[in-house]
Amino acid sequence: MIKHSVLIADSGSTKTDWAFMGKCIQTQGINPFHQDEDTIRHILQEELLPQLSNSYDRLTSILFYGSGVRPELEEKMQNILQDAFPHVTHIEAHSDLLGAARALCGENEGIACILGTGANSCLFDGSLIVKNTPAMGYILGDEGSGAVLGIRFLNALYKNRLSDQIRMEFETSTGMSMAQVIERVYRQPMPNRWLASLSVFIHQHLDYPAVKTIVVQNFIDFIRHNIAPYQRTDLPISAVGSIAFFFKEQLAEAAIQEGYTIGNILRSPLDALIKG
């Protein structure tokens, strides 16, 4: 397989990063669990293909790693990609967690995590995922994720566990009142993406101890609920995703408190997957 002829995708809930022939392009997130086939086809046709332009005919293989690509949905995702790229002879679709594990651990054993809009983790044996604690999404789980961080921040903000100064700064920054926040979360599409977007404001206010505590506790709960069941404190915790990358100091603090060390932290697994 000639590397420059391979299109590699890393897709999360918010965005999909694509790499092809040394060029990185981006579309909105693709998730076959939450999106129907027509929605995914529209993204491929209207967002991806125009950006590939003249390079389209050189494409021979596709490796797609994506959120929501469970084993039972791999064939569905492969078929959608085949319809969009009928001339491509080799297409694989796997979970974003496997892509993260390969990028973070290579051929070594390790604990690999995704900490972005959503969260997930696994025990990786250097080839396959051997254990996985179900993340269960931002309503039932997803501790450590950007979406849950947003939920916990808003809960603290409007239940008077944060200062009036922070609330005024937040409402000035977003132009939203509590009523508008509730409207956005409960009545608008993709609330998980919006909740995760609040991580930018949160990061800007880490000098407030109460805000920092929310971040650290979110990671502590992630480790206790998702990593501890592997019973492998001998392995470092490695992670990909914007939340892991921008809050790496707070992640390290949480890990130390729980008896773990931190391994590789990557904003995106794409560069490592290309090299691999």
Image (cartoon, helix red, strand yellow):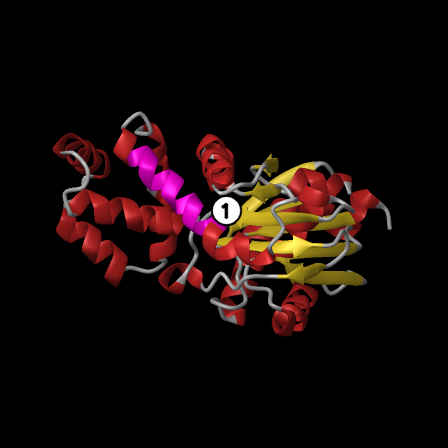
Indicate the quadrant where residue 69 lies.
Answer: bottom right
Label total for image: 1
Residue 120 appears in the picture as rendered: no
Element on which disc 1 rests: strand
Give how far across and how far down residue 230 sits, in percent: 60, 57
Query: Was residue 216 drawn as part of the magenta stretch in this picture?
Result: yes
Observer-nearest of 232 and 183: 232
Give how far across and how far down residue 176 sits, in percent: 18, 43
Residue appearing at x 12%, y 34% in the figure? 164
Observer-nearest of 73 and 8: 73
Q: Residue furthest right?
A: 1
Residue appearing at x 65%, y 42% in the figure? 270
Left or right of 165 on screen, residue 38:
right
Residue kind at label 1, given as amino acid type:
Leu
Query: Was residue 62 drawn as part of the magenta stretch in this picture?
Result: no
Residue appearing at x 39%, y 59% in the figure? 138
Q: Which residues are magenta?
A: 211-223
